Structure formats: structure tokens, C-alpha cells
Amino acid sequence: MTHALYLLDPDPSPAWMPFAGIRPLCELRAGAHLVRERWEMFVGTEASAIFALPHLAGFPEPGVPPVEARQPVTGPAVIGSSTFAPRGLAGPFPDAPARLTHEGITVGWSVPAGTTWSGPVANAHAMQVEGVVLRGVHDLVSALEQLLRDDLVRLLGDSDAVPRGSVVLGDPTWITVREAAIEPGVVFDTRNGPVVLESGVEVRAGTRLEGPLWVGANTRLMGGAIRHSAIGPWCVVHGEVATTAFLGYANKSHHGFLGHSVLGRWVNFGAGTTTSNLKSTYGSVRLQVAGTKLETGHQFLGSLFGDHAKTAIGMLFDAGSVIGAGASVFDGIRAPKYVAPFAWGGASSERMTSQGFLATVERVLPRRHVDVTDAMRAYLQRAYDWLIT
């Protein structure tokens, strides 16, 4: 019996900044796949809807199911939490209401035919599932470490030949190249995991690709050492990059170290922007989000950049920095550890106007062949109004 799939976002909290309020949280990348895509593979069907904040209704990115306010669901159905990245395929769902659990934590619900789910069900049967629990955006970094290698092993398949002039360290069968343009002098290192380049990827001479590494369609890798990362479509990447998740459409086209970080869509790094990913004490990195302190438990953690965030040339970010959606950071050299959404400068309390933000969007998105539609303008205005209050 086919089950419908619904994704359930958590209530907004500091742990989900800088993405809470700007995008459904199931549209974040955990390993090579979005959280939603992982649930779709797990259940074996495309999601019917995402239950998220009301102002995100009409979320305009292609391929995303309708975003709606939470509502009762009639079975047969699965409600999956956006705070969990499933691994593998689901087993048979029981004929009675079931609570999907991982290490004692509820991560979803199974709703049998003839019943309706409207919230937690008392005394529901517990069904154990495999995957990674996400306590916040920072755990997308540990999800890379836990999920990416296995994701890429499954993504290996039919491949173009690795071009002559490339250097291969490790097993060449762990390289999959799908209609990518690769200049001579590129190094592929598969000793720690596969390298998968999707259609339209361009790799310039002087680039070192170390697996596990996934690069989405139409991304350009312009030079430098790039390792253990998942880079979404239509990005430009240059310099040293390690253990970082790119949602897509981000621009890091200059030198500067980026490590153990998460980049939202339409992020732009000025030349020389560099993130720290390790404290000088080698201790656990703490986040500071709008006055709230969060212990991450991560020794290695860089910065979390929300959608449409931008940095000036030469900016430095401490380990555990959080940069709000739409922020433009240019005050001084060392940025504050927390930059509010739509901040103008970073250190001051000044914010971009909605007109100024939307005018920038109108200039940026067509550079990646994305039309700025009325639906996108309306969504961005609603997100601005929600985040600025």
C-alpha cells in the first residue's frame, strides 16, 4: 500500500537560524541530498506537502511540494520530521498508528488507512528507523560526515571517461563524471571516498577534488583544494573548502578558507573571506544567536550563512558564526559571531530596507538564469517582514 508523505518543520528556534523563517527546513542539505529528498527515498514516494510557517506558503523554488500550515492527515500516510535525515529504505509500516523513532527520539509518524493524524498519538507502536537526528543547522555538518560517503557510493554509475591529463589518486572506479568539462591538471583523490560530478560541472586546472565529494549540476570549480563537501547546483567555488554543505546558487569565486560550514542559496563571498572552524582551545564550539547561547558539541564548526547573505572582501568569521538571511557584512575585518537577518554592515543595528533587498535580488538571480517572479517577490517580502520583527 502506498503511503502519502508529509514533512513537518519544527517550531522556529535559535538552533534553526539562519534558515528558520526564510525556507522550509526540510529543504536543507544533509549529505548529498536534501532532507526532503531523503524522506522521499525512505518512503518511496514524493512528498505531498510541507507543513511549515504560514508565511512560507507559496515557497517558489522549483520541485518543492506545496508549503502549508499544519493540518490533519488521513492515512495511509507518513509524517516525517524535518529534523531527521533518514538512511536507507523503510520497512513495512504497521496497520496500527506507529511512532517512528531513532535512539528513543520521535522522528515521524505512520498513519494507517482509515485513521487521521492531528498530532502525537498516545501509546502508538514504536518503529525504529535509521538516520541522523538534527538538533539544529550545525548538525548538517556532522550529517556530511555520517551520510555523504554512503550517499556517493550509491550515486556511482555510468560515467564519462576521466579526461587525459587528470591525476587519479586511489580507485578510479570511484569517480563518476556526467558530462562535465574538466581541464588538464585536475587531481581526483578517492582514497577516502568517491567523487561525483553531475551534468554541466566545469573544473578548472589546478583544482584538487578529494572524496567524498558531490558537485551538483552546472557548478564551476575554479581552483583550490575541495574536499568532503556537498556542493549544490549552479555554484562557483574557488579556494580551500572542507566539510561544507552548499544548498546551491552560491558564489565563492576567490581565495579564502571555508570549512565545516553551511551556505544557503544566493550567498556571495567577497575575495579573501575566511572562516575559522576550530577554537584555539580545541574545545567545543558554542553558537550565540540573538542573545541565546547554544552548545553544539562540535570541535570543528565554521559558519552558518543564511540565504542571500553577502560578505565584503577580506572578512574573517570566528568558529560558530551565524549570519542571518539577507545580511550584508562589511563592517571592519572580523565579523560579529551573530549577524542579524538583513543587517547592513554587521556590527551596527542598521538593516536593509525591503526595497533595497529586493532590488539586489532582481540583479543577482538572473545571473544564474533564474527569473524573479511575482510569487518570489511576494514570498521574499513575507519572509523579510517575519524576520525583521
Image (cartoon, rainbow, N blue to C red):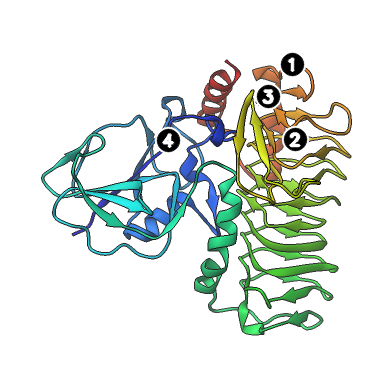
Q: Is residue 16 left or right of residue 98?
A: right
Q: In the image, which disc is placed on residue 310?
A: 2
Q: Are marks 2 and 3 in contact (CB under 8 Å)?
A: no
Viewer-side label of 4, 2: 4
Q: Are marks 1 and 4 in contact (CB under 8 Å)?
A: no
- How far is disc 1 from disc 3 in space, using C-alphas? 10 Å
- Report the residue at 46% width, 48% height from top: 63
Which class describes the residues within 10 Å of circle 1: few (<14), some (14-19), or many (20+)?
few
Mark closer to the chain start, 4 or 2: 4
Mark closer to the chain start, 1 or 3: 3
Which class describes the residues within 10 Å of circle 4: few (<14), some (14-19), or many (20+)?
some
Mark closer to the chain start, 2 or 3: 2
Q: In the image, which disc is placed on residue 349?
A: 1
> Residue flagged by tag 3: what amino acid is it?
Phe
Q: In the image, which disc is placed on residue 144?
A: none
Q: Position of residue 24 (x, y in %)?
A: 48, 38
Q: In the image, which disc is placed on residue 342?
A: 3
**Quadrant of the image occupied by residue 15:** top right
Viewer-side label of 1, 3: 1
Viewer-closest of 317 and 255: 317
Element under disc 4:
loop
Viewer-closest of 173 and 203: 173
- Report the residue at 81% width, 51% height from top: 257
Element under disc 3:
loop
Task: Read off the residue under disc 4.
Answer: 10
Q: Is residue 294 left or right of residue 337?
A: left
**Quadrant of the image occupied by residue 313:** top right
Element under disc 2:
strand
> Residue flagged by tag 2: what amino acid is it?
Lys
Q: Position of residue 251 (x, y in %)?
A: 74, 46
- How far is disc 4 from disc 2 in space, using C-alphas? 27 Å
